[in-house]
């Protein structure tokens, strides 16, 4: 009977394609939108992940997420260094500064100032030059995306692509000269501004004069030191906030979850995809069953049990569901692949496969159930009705 | 004389939203095994309702209807399905073949319902198609066959599992006169034998001569049961 069920399904090509397309659409929306969402959300804390080395981030207690800079006094660094259990503590400056480009225009950049002696917290990957080159005077390292796009030099042909910044090129940060000595690769951040690395003291000289300029104190704990314990003693003795790397990521992530419209926007898209997909697939599947009701009646009159008819319909639903799911997920993967070198955020963890799989199963179960009810209630005597 | 069907005081009332229609009103009818019985009468007199009850696809409200000595009304639904699957073949006015199955696959359906393996069922189906003169067309889809050919496929389907009773509702109404007579010839020559009974509902006076007996209905009653000229007339 399975063979008959499949032939019945595929014999009606128009409806068959309709059902599969509805499910493909639903599974596409239910994977592609969350993938972009997860991509964007992972960018919110990518700076924390990129810095990597420190165990604990010490910040002003009012800071809500990683880009929410509330500077502290430099003296806080020494207080943190004095706490037992701290292996080392390094200053870091992070702030938005305007860079003046060769053509006279300005571009806001994320300037990161690293401890002058150790350069801890530098970019994760150096593409050209060395991190140590930051010890030369006026030197900066620029991230590759910023260097080739927003900080690029005007094209020689009008309307052409900007010419990427190279080692040896100059920038102006707050009327002070900066010389590019390296190109780095950083993970894209939420705001996607160019990232410029320099030393802590030079960053302070680029920044507008303020009493407080220390953004973070990066702390490495001594070997065997309990991190939660250490954050507590830092909080108690300095009155500052102290987060483990994971907690700081969560803090940032949660801030975006609760204080921006991003989750709601994407949640709505996913829900709409689910509803529209369910409506299209459910409707076409039910129509397909109605269209074939005489065939089901004939099978019933000839002695096919409800149980077997139910299995036939389930098989049909599972088949269209699997094809639709596969196509939808495939299209999403293709989309992700096509977008891999663009600014678009995209993250496709395996959990997303389960999520959309569950969504599609739900739609198919719904479509199958309404059809099954119809067929179970069917009187076989309809076979003699014209 | 063995009885294939025995109906006693059968009543069927359709209730559609308060409006009651008595489709069968105290039907008494015996159908002799191995004969071709025709049910005739004006439109709406209850012919289709009666063969539905006889074939066990519709439950009567009152009375007894026995099929080869079995009362389908009191059977467990699973046994009833098995009984239908083994003992009854159906032929419809509109053929009711499954449009996406080819002729052989269509004919094999009753065998598959009875649990036969597909390959064997299709082999058997092809021999049946040969018997109805369509051996060469076993791969054709219903849409590729003429009305008469489709009805012959449907007859092969009604025969393939060797049932004891074949019920046909207006098997020739959708066909022209010549084709209709050919279909009737096929039913009479191939389908009917001493262990198989045919009940055929028809309007078509031109095929009455194929009947062994004719039951005339009107308004839910059996008015008269006539034997064919060769047979003794029964009341
Ligand atoms: N499912 C149903 N619900 C309600 N009334 C019905 C139903 N089926 C048949 N009837 C009514 O029962 C009566 C007998 O119908 P039936 O179909 O048995 O007649 P018939 O003799 O086969 O007619 P025809 O020659 O037009 O096919 C008619 O009055 C019909 O309207
Ligand atoms: Mg009728």
Image (cartoon, rainbow, N blue to C red):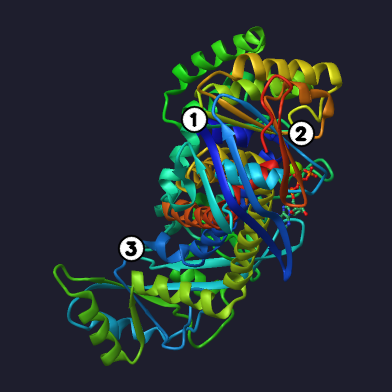
Of the residues tagged 1 and 2, which is closer to the observer? 1
Mark 2–mark 3 Cα distance, whole angstroms, equals 102 Å
Labels 2 and 3 in the same subunit: no
Q: State the residue at coordinates (42%, 46%).
A: B78
Where residue B143 sits, quadrant-wise, is top right
Mark 3–mark 1 Cα distance, whole angstroms, equals 108 Å
- Residue A283 left/right relative to A375: right
* Chain hosting mark 2: B
- Residue A182 left/right relative to A282: left
Say what secondary structure mark 2 lies in: loop
Of the residues tagged 2 and 3, which is closer to the observer? 2
Q: Position of residue B101 (x, y in %)?
A: 62, 26
Compared to residue B169, the image places residue A22 above or below, namely below
* Chain hosting mark 3: A
Check if mark 1's residue and mark 2's residue have beta carbons within 8 Å: no
Q: Position of residue A38 (x, y in %)?
A: 51, 60
Labels 1 and 2 in the same subunit: yes
Q: Position of residue A229 (x, y in %)?
A: 20, 81
Mark 3: C-beta under 8 Å from nearest atom of ligand 1: no
- In terms of depth relative to the viewer, which is nearer, A98 or B51? B51
Label of residue A118 in the image:
3
Query: Which residue lies under the disc numbered 2?
Result: B202
* Res A165 visible: no
- In terms of depth relative to the viewer, which is nearer, A385 or A71? A385
Mark 1–mark 2 Cα distance, whole angstroms, equals 24 Å
Label of residue B2 in the image:
1
Q: Classify 10 Å Cα crowding around label 3: few (below 14), some (14-19), many (20 and above).
A: few
Residue located farthest toward the left when viewing the structure as drawn? A224
Q: State the residue at coordinates (56%, 62%).
A: A37
Compared to residue A201, the image places residue A348 above or below, namely above
Say what secondary structure mark 1 lies in: loop
């Amino acid at each position: 009977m399975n063979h008959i069920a499949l032939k019945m399904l595929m014999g009606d090509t128009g409806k068959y394609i309709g059902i599969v397309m509805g499910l493909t659409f639903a599974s596409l929306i239910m994977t592609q939108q969350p993938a972009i969402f997860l991509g964007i959300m992972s960018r919110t804390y990518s700076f924390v992940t990129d810095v990597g080395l420190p165990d604990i981030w010490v910040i002003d207690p009012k800071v809500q997420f990683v880009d929410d800079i509330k500077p502290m006094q430099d003296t806080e660094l020494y207080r943190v260094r004095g706490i037992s259990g701290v292996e080392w503590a390094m200053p870091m400056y992070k702030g938005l500064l305007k860079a003046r480009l060769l053509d006279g225009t300005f571009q806001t950049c994320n300037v990161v100032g690293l401890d002058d002696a150790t350069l801890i917290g530098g970019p994760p990957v150096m593409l050209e030059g060395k991190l140590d080159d930051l010890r030369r005077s006026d030197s900066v390292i620029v991230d590759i995306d910023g260097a080739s796009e927003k900080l690029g030099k005007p094209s020689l042909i009008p309307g052409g692509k900007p010419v990427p910044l190279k080692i040896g090129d100059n920038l102006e940060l707050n009327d002070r000269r900066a010389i590019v000595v390296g190109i780095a690769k950083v993970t894209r951040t939420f705001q996607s501004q160019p990232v410029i690395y320099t030393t802590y003291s030079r960053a302070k000289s680029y920044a507008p004069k303020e009493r407080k300029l220390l953004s973070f104190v990066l702390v490495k704990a001594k070997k065997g030191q309990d991190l939660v314990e250490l954050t507590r003693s830092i909080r108690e003795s300095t009155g500052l906030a102290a987060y483990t790397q994971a907690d700081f990521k969560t803090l940032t992530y949660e801030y975006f979850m609760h204080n921006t419209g991003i989750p709601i926007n994407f949640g709505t898209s996913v829900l709409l995809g689910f509803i529209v997909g369910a409506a299209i697939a459910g409707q076409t599947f039910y129509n397909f069953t109605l269209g074939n009701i005489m065939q089901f009646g004939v099978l019933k009159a000839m002695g096919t049990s409800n149980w077997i008819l139910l299995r036939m319909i389930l098989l049909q639903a599972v088949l269209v569901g699997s094809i639709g799911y596969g196509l939808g997920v495939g299209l999403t993967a293709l989309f992700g692949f096509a977008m891999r070198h663009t600014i678009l955020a995209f993250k496709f963890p395996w959990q997303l496969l389960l999520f959309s799989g569950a969504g599609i199963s739900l739609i198919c179960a719904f479509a199958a159930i309404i059809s099954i009810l119809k067929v179970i209630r069917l009187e076989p005597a309809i076979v003699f009705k014209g | 004389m063995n009885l294939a069907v025995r109906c006693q005081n059968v009543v069927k009332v359709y209730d559609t939203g308060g409006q009651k229609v008595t489709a069968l009103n105290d039907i008494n009818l015996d159908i002799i095994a191995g004969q071709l019985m025709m049910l005739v009468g004006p439109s709406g007199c209850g012919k289709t309702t009666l063969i539905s009850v006889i074939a066990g696809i519709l439950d009567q409200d009152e009375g007894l209807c026995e099929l080869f000595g079995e009362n389908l009304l009191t059977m467990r639904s699973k046994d009833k399905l098995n009984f239908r699957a083994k003992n009854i073949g159906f032929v419809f006015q509109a053929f009711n073949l499954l449009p996406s199955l080819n002729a052989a696959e269509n004919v094999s359906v009753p065998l598959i319902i009875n649990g036969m393996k597909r390959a064997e069922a299709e082999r058997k189906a092809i021999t049946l198609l040969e018997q109805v003169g369509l051996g060469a067309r076993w791969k054709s889809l219903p849409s590729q066959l003429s009305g008469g050919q489709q009805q012959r496929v449907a007859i092969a389907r009604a025969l393939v599992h060797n049932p004891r009773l074949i019920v046909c509702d207006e098997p020739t109404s959708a066909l022209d006169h010549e084709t209709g007579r050919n279909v009737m010839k096929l039913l009479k020559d191939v389908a009917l034998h001493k262990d198989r009974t045919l009940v055929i509902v028809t309007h078509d006076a031109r095929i009455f001569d194929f009947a062994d007996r004719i039951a005339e209905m009107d308004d839910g009653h059996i008015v008269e049961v006539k034997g064919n000229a060769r047979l003794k007339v029964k009341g």
